[in-house]
Amino acid sequence: MIKTVIFDLGNVIVPLDFAAGYRAISGLCGIAPEDVPRRIGETDLVKRLESGQMADADFIRELSAVLGLRCSEPDFRRLWSSIFPPHTLIPESLVTGLKKNYRLLLLSNTNAIHFEMIWENYPLVRHMDDFVLSHKVGAMKPSEKIYEAALALAQCRPEECFFTDDIAAYVEGAKRHGIDAVQFVGYESLVAELDRRGVVWR
């Protein structure tokens, strides 16, 4: 019997539009949008930020130097969060319905800049009972440490947890810990998986 439902964040609750973010950055630094991810990827700055090894201010300063960005910290934060469209991929009604009967957790590879924006702009996440965020835990999926942190907050056995994530490797990481997990491919598929397990959400 499922007692705790665990959601990933990006491309499960909130869509990710990296192309929009790259275009926004390009407009301020003169680097072609298609070259922005390459420049970022040549560094380990995002990994360090999202695994809690780097302070926001240091990240902003160092990435701005890499990209040749000249903007204020508040402007950088808005720019860095421009990957998030305003809509969600699942309705708030699903989450509020689940909350009546189950403990809800959010398990995400993310950073404080993004999560602050998410918290302010997507009320759906405020229904979660607890949060397992990579920059807080100090580890990223599919590291064992982050799943162990989730199970510590789940307040039930691993097999009593249901987890959905859009990335197959992260789903497999959860399964290795005994968690019932499926890859998120869309809202209709998710509710079918919940129904199959007898999870009440309506």
Image (cartoon, rainbow, N blue to C red):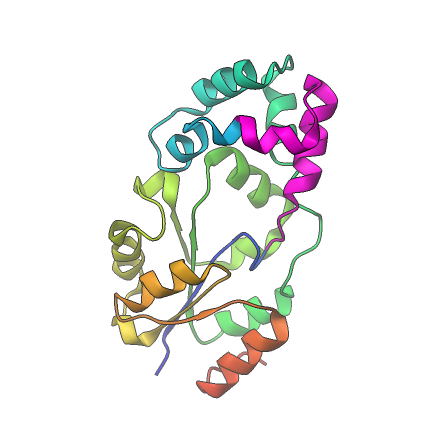
- Tell me which corner region of the image, top left, top right, bottom left or bottom right, holds residue 125: bottom right
On the image, the x and y values in percent for residue 24 come to 71, 30
State the quadrant of the N terminus. Answer: bottom left
On the image, the x and y values in percent for residue 65 come to 53, 13
| Residue beneath the point at 63% across and 76% down | 188
- Tell me which corner region of the image, top left, top right, bottom left or bottom right, holds residue 156: bottom left
Q: Main secondary structure of the magenta part?
A: helix
- Relative to 40, residue 154 above or below: below
| Residue beneath the point at 58% across and 19% down | 67
* Front position in the image: 90 or 182: 182
Left or right for 147, reference 91: left
The boundaries of the magenta stretch are 14-39
Q: Say if the magenta span includes residue 124.
A: no
State the quadrant of the C terminus. Answer: bottom right
- Relative to 92, residue 125 above or below: above
On the image, the x and y values in percent for residue 199 come to 47, 82
On the image, the x and y values in percent for residue 18 come to 63, 42
